[in-house]
Image (cartoon, rainbow, N blue to C red):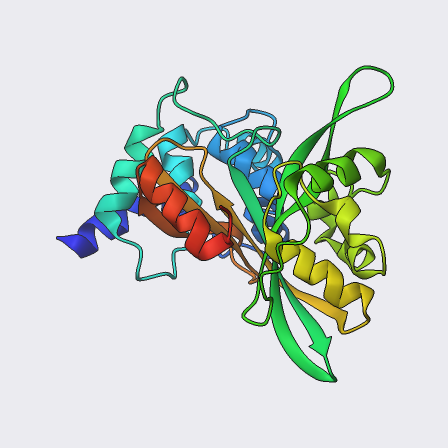
Amino acid sequence: MKLSVLASLFSIFSLISNAQQLQTADLTENFALSVQTIDDFFDRFNLEPNTPAFQYLQENYPDFKFDRKTIIFSLFDQGNRSLDANIINEFATQFESDSATKIRFELPGWYSVLHCLVKIKNKLHKLDLIMEIDSVHLRSGSIGYKWSIRSVKAPYIHTQDSLSKKDSTAIYKASSDFLHPMSHALNFLNIKNIFRKGMTRSYFAKEADSPDLDSLVSLIDKSQLKYVQLESVSYHIFQLPGWIVEVNNFDRLTRNSGWLISKLLSADENEKKKYMLSKLNIR
C-alpha cells in the first residue's frame, strides 16, 4: 500500500512523460525543471504563474495540466525514503487550494542556516549561523529588507551575557552595514564580511537577543576565530500552519533537483518553539 502511495505522490515527472511521451531529458530540460533558488521554491509552492519552470512546461507541453497539489509533490526529494508518503499527502492536500497559505519572502517565520567552516587555534570547526530577513526603513520612507544574524550554534560557543538586548538594538540602528536581501541567490558569498573585527554586531537581527552572539563577536574581535568557507545552506520554514519544512539543495542532473523538501514535520506552535530552540538556538 505504501509503495503505491509513494508512486502516486511523486508522479509529476512521470505524468509529464505519459502525457507527452517524453524521452530522457537533456541538460536543458533538467535545468529548466530543477528548483534553482529558494525564491523559485516559494514561487512553485505558491503556484505563481510566471515561474520559469511553469512557462517552460506550458511552452513545450501545452496539453499537460498541473495543479498546486501536484507541484507540491514535485518539491520533495524523491530519493529520501524517510519521508512518509501519507504525511506528504496530508500536507499537499492542506495547501492545494489557491486560497491556502502561501510562503512569503518578506514575512517572518523562515530562516536560512549557513553551515560554515571556521578555524580556531589552527583547527577546523563547524559553526552554524542562523539568518533571517529583517525589514529596514529606508530614507525614502519605504521599507527594504536585509539578511541578518538571528542566532549562532556551535558547541564551543559559550554563553556570555554581556550584551543586553537594548545595546544590541542600538548597534543595529546605528550601523549601515548589511547583507543584501538577495544574498541567498549568490549562495551567501558575502557572509565572510561579518567575520571582520568590529563588524559582526552590525549584522544582528532586531530580535537577536541570544547571548551566544556576543561570544561569537568576542572570538572574532580577539582574532581567535577565523572564517574559512561556507559548506552548505539549509532553509527552515515555519510559516505554514501546523508544519515545519526543511529545504536543502540537491545538486544532480535530474529534473528532481535543486532546492527540495528534505524534512517535513507536523507541529503545533509549541512544538515549533521547541524545534527552534533545539535546532536553531532561537529563544
Relative side of 228 to 272, left or right:
right
Determine the residue positioned at 42% across, 45% down: 245
Q: Nearer the viewer, residue 139 or 32?
A: 139
Relative side of 68 to 210, left or right:
left
Judge whether residue 39 can be spotted in this image: yes
Determine the residue positioned at 58% across, 61% down: 159
Residue 183's x, y, as percent? 74, 46
Numbered circles on residues, count = 0
Residue 125's x, y, as percent? 63, 76
Judge whether residue 57 can be spotted in this image: no
Residue 54's x, y, as percent? 55, 33
Answer above or below: position of 234 versus 142. Answer: below
Determine the residue positioned at 39% across, 61% down: 79
Q: Residue furthest top?
A: 141
Q: Residue furthest front?
A: 162
Residue 264's x, y, as percent? 36, 48
Determine the residue positioned at 62% across, 43% down: 208
Answer above or below: position of 44 versus 224. Answer: above
Q: Residue furthest bottom?
A: 122
Q: Quadrant of residue 202?
A: top right
